[in-house]
C-alpha cells in the first residue's frame, strides 16, 4: 500500500462542533484529494489540492474547508459538524493530474450525533 | 457537471457465474479507471483505459472502453468468492482540465459459494 495515513480512523462528535481530519503521505505526490463515501452515492469529491497552498472545491464542498501547508499533509475541517456529514471520508493521492492512478488511505469513519 | 452512472447497483451471483458492470458518462472521457473496494476496505486501483475501443484483460477480468469514450464495462468470468466487493469506475472529462476524477456509484458484487 502507498504511504498514506489518515487520522483519526474513527470519530464520534456532536452537532455543531468543529472537526479536523488529517491525511499524511510519504510518497511526495503533488495531488491530494478528500472524498466522502455514502451508500448509493459512491465516492464524491469534497476538495482537492494540486500543491502546497493550492486547493480547489469538489462537487460537495459546502460545510468543508481544507488546508495544505506542507506537501505531505492535507487537512479537512468541518467548521460546524452536522448529522448530514456522518460518512466515511477517504483521502487519496496521485502523482499527476490526469493519467495516473489514485492511491487511497484507509478511511475515517465520522459519526455526528 | 460531469456525471458518471454505473449499473447495476447490486449484483448477486453464484460462484462460477459471470458478472458484468457498466459505466456511462454524460461527457466524453479522456480516460477511465476501475477500482475495487473490499468490504470494510478502501478503493484499490485495478486498471486505466485511455484509447477509444480499448480492451484490456487481467486474468478473469476484461475491461472495455467504448468507441465514443463515454462508456465502459468490467466483465468477470467465472466469479470466485475472492471477487466479492464493490467495483467503481472513475473518469476524467475531456471537456474540463484539471484533476477531477468523477466516480460512479459502484456495483456491489456478492458471490455465493
Image (cartoon, coloured by chain):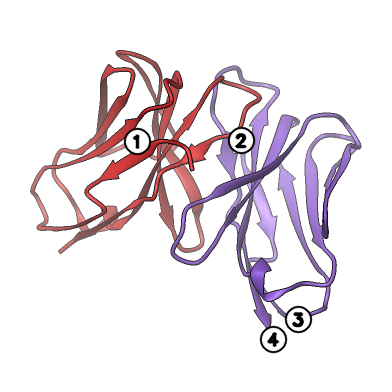
Q: Are marks 3 and 2 on the same chain?
A: yes
Q: Residue at x 78, y 38 (%)?
A: B70
Q: Tell which subunit mark 1 falls on.
A: A
Percent coordinates x, y for residue B61 in the rendering: 80, 56
Spatial CA span between label 3 and label 4: 5 Å
State the residue position of label 3.
B15
What residue did someone put label 4 on? B113
Name the colour assigned to chain B in the rendering.
Answer: purple
- In the picture of the structure, the residue carrying the numbered disc 1 is A61
Give the residue drawn at x 88%, y 37%: B54
Closer to viewer: mark 3 or mark 2? 3
Give residue A80's position: percent from left, percent from top: 13, 44
Looking at the rendered structure, the secondary structure element under dot 2 is loop
Q: Quadrant of the N terminus of chain B?
A: top right
Q: Position of residue A36 (x, y in %)?
A: 39, 48
Mark 2 vs 4: CB contact within 8 A = no
Subunit under mark 3: B
Amino acid at each position: 500500500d502507498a504511504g498514506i495515513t489518515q487520522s483519526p480512523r474513527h470519530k464520534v462528535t456532536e452537532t455543531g462542533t468543529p472537526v479536523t481530519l488529517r491525511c499524511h503521505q510519504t510518497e511526495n505526490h503533488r495531488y491530494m484529494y478528500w472524498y466522502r463515501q455514502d451508500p448509493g452515492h459512491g465516492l464524491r469529491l469534497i476538495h482537492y489540492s494540486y500543491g502546497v497552498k493550492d486547493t480547489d472545491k469538489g462537487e460537495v464542498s459546502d460545510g468543508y474547508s481544507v488546508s495544505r501547508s506542507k506537501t505531505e499533509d492535507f487537512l479537512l475541517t468541518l467548521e460546524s459538524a452536522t448529522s448530514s456529514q456522518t460518512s466515511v471520508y477517504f483521502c487519496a493521492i496521485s502523482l499527476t493530474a490526469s493519467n495516473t492512478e489514485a492511491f487511497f488511505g484507509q478511511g475515517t469513519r465520522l459519526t455526528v450525533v | 457537471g460531469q456525471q458518471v452512472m454505473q449499473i447495476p447497483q447490486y449484483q448477486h451471483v453464484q460462484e462460477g457465474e459471470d458478472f458484468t458492470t457498466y459505466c456511462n458518462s454524460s461527457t466524453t472521457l479522456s480516460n477511465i479507471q476501475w477500482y475495487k473496494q473490499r468490504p470494510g476496505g478502501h478503493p484499490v486501483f485495478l486498471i486505466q483505459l485511455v484509447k477509444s475501443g480499448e480492451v484490456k484483460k487481467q486474468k478473469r477480468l476484461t475491461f472495455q472502453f467504448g468507441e465514443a469514450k463515454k462508456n465502459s464495462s468490467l466483465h468477470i468470468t467465472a466469479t470466485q468468492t475472492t471477487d466479492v466487493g464493490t467495483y467503481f469506475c472513475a473518469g476524467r472529462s475531456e471537456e474540463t482540465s484539471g484533476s477531477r476524477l468523477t466516480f460512479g456509484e459502484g456495483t456491489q458484487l456478492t458471490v455465493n459459494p
